[in-house]
Amino acid sequence: MRKGILELCVLSIISQEEAYPSDIIKKLKESQLIVVEGTLYPLLSRLKNAALLKYTWKESNAGPPRKYYQLTEEGTGFLGELKSTWEQLNHAVHQSTKTIESA
């Protein structure tokens, strides 16, 4: 379940603007989702191989060129589906725990 949520969060971050992996990790940490490079890089690779992401190389002042990720058209559609699924799941959990809270 966490994997699907992580995909949702990563794609949402990238949908706002093209992103470098360390920037993605920083934004996740700011949201209190602790993710390390060893988790993020395979996820980015999997999303790219699924044609949900693409990347461009940009020169860096601090070393070699960097990969910046963007959503593809397919990625934008997939993100919409993930958000819809998340909203349905969130609603279902809220409804089922609401009865516990009122008991």
Image (cartoon, grey):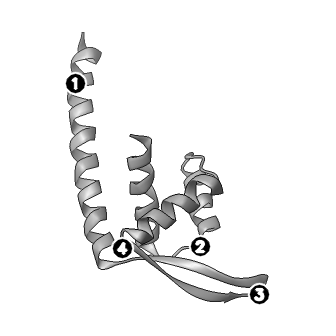
Q: Residue 35 placed where, x, y %?
A: 59, 50
Q: Amino acid at mark 1?
A: Ser
Q: Residues within 10 Å of mark 4 (few under 14, many from 20)?
A: some
Picture disc at residue 61: 3
Query: Which residue is painted at 35% across and 78% down in the image?
Result: 72
Do the residues under discs 1 and 2 have CB atoms within 8 angstroms?
no
Crowding at dot 2, Cα within 10 Å, few <14 / some 14-19 / many 20+, comes out as some
Where does label 4 land, which residue? 51
What residue is shown with label 2?
20
Measured in 3D between alpha carbons, the distance from the residue under mark 3 to the one under mark 2, in whole angstroms, is 14 Å
Q: Amino acid at mark 2?
A: Tyr
Residue 27 seen anywhere in this rendered image of the structure: no
Name the quadrant containing residue 66.
bottom right
Q: Determine if residue 14 is in view.
A: yes
Q: SS of the residue at dot 1?
A: helix
Residue shown at the point (59%, 87%) measured from the top left = 57
List the residue tagged with mark 1: 96
N-terminal of the two: label 1 or label 2?
2
Return the x and y of residue 38 as percentages of the image width and height: 63, 54
Q: Which mark is residue 16?
A: none
**Mark 4 or mark 2, earlier in chain:** 2
Q: Nearer the viewer, mark 4 or mark 2?
A: 4
Residue in the image at 38% along x and 40% along y: 1
Disc number lying in front (3 or 1): 3
Q: Position of residue 30 (x, y in %)?
A: 59, 53
- 88 left or right, relative to 15: left
Label whose residue precedes the other's in the sequence (3 or 4): 4
Give how far apart the Cα atoms at labels 1 and 2 are: 39 Å
**48 to the left or right of 98:** right
